[in-house]
Amino acid sequence: MSRISLSRFLIEAQRTEGNLPPELRLLIETVARACKAISHSVNKGALAGVLGEAGSGNVQGEAQKKLDVIANDILLEANEWGGSLAAMASEEMELPYSIPENYPRGRYLLLFDPLDGSSNIDVNISVGTIFSVLECPPGDVAPSEADFLQSGRRQVAAGYTVYGPQTMLVLTFGHGVHGFTLDREQGSFVLTHPDMRIPASTKEFAINMSNQRHWEAPVQRYIGELLAGTTGPLGKDYNMRWVASMVAEVHRILVRGGVFMYPKDARDPSKPGKLRLMYEGNPMAFIVEQAGGAATNGRMPILDIQPSKLHERVAIFLGSREEVERVTAYHAAD
Ligand code: AHM
Ligand code: MG
């Protein structure tokens, strides 16, 4: 059978399912093209002089790496002229980016974390790009932050690209989750993982254990049970992984199951979590639900949260359904 490129897959989805408007297809193709360029920079690393600090900070108060800035610029430049977008928002920019007036303005909003897991860049461990697409509410004026504040249920597409041993793009537009591997010789993404499904049960979990003393009681209880293994109430031994790259963790979970957690942390009670809702939590929750898994903040589905600001943070429990339901039930019982 002939190989199915991302372009062919999207055109066929547009034709047969009628669920992919042409402007959205173009937008996804443009994001994929930008991810190829980011992949190229990530792969070149020290050869292109792109490792290390940028010498600047972002709105989250985090030091930016050179590749954070490069990836952000690549996504902005690739997406500003195509006519599908009304505005963009990024982890690396305090305010939304309006489409310049010399380009046509389209009906979608694009949100992204240009390079997630960037503490891994300089040590040659997987990083990734995460993106989310919303429809822009109608209006004549340039979109503002308020237009972005829609719940994750309203996403029309979401995806990530993981820059690992292979570069892979994983995508949903509400009809399952499909994975594409970058063929560097051909320069195209090829469908290699159609209809990815997360097994309902698992024996693998991912959490930053060094934060244990700061967790709330339900998380302490749950992780305590996982660690107790066959000697505890769950009656099975679990294995642990922590890449410190959410994209890599979610990818592992999509391929072989597992549960990923970044809970609320008592070190800063004003923050509901470390990760950001709109361009980390929501797109990953959309992908995970579409693959048969679950994603909550411990209390409710992440996709049902009504955001109140662009860079809002959220606690995250996502992956294999049985485990996410268990830790969510422990929060309800607390
Ligand atoms: P970033 O967007 O600044 O890269 O931060 C997000 C990353 C996630 O990919 C990962 O799960 C987490 O931060 C790792 O945090 P920790 O430093 O606690 O290991
Ligand atoms: Mg991030």
Image: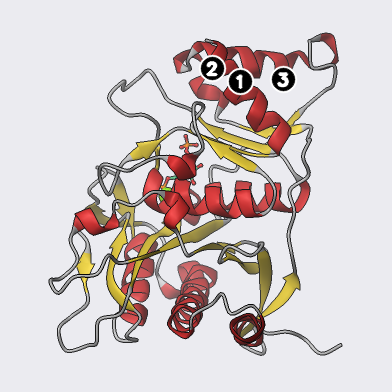
Residue type at mark 2: give it.
Ala
Residue 247 location, x and y as percent? Answer: 56, 52
Residue 282 location, x and y as percent? Answer: 46, 49
Q: Is residue 49 left or right of residue 224?
A: left
Q: Please, is residue 238 above or below residue 113 in the view?
A: above
Circle on res. 329:
1
Characterize the local packing of mark 1: few (<14), some (14-19) or many (20 or more) Cα atoms within 10 angstroms: some
Q: CA distance from mark 1 to mark 3?
A: 15 Å
Residue type at mark 3: give it.
Leu
Q: CA distance from mark 2 to mark 1?
A: 5 Å
Residue type at mark 1: give it.
Ala
Q: Is residue 102 left or right of residue 189?
A: left
* Res 180 seen here: yes
Q: CA distance from mark 3 to mark 2?
A: 19 Å
Residue marked by disc 2: 332
Residue marked by disc 3: 226
**Which of the 4 image quadrants contains residue 333?**
top right
Residue 232 location, x and y as percent? Answer: 79, 10
Characterize the local packing of mark 3: few (<14), some (14-19) or many (20 or more) Cα atoms within 10 angstroms: many
Question: Decide: marks 3, 2 in contact (CB < 8 A)?
Answer: no
Say whether mark 3 is within 8 Å of ligand 1. Answer: no
Of residue 195 and residue 262, the one placed in the foreground of this image is 195
Q: Is residue 196 left or right of residue 106?
A: right
Number of numbered discs: 3
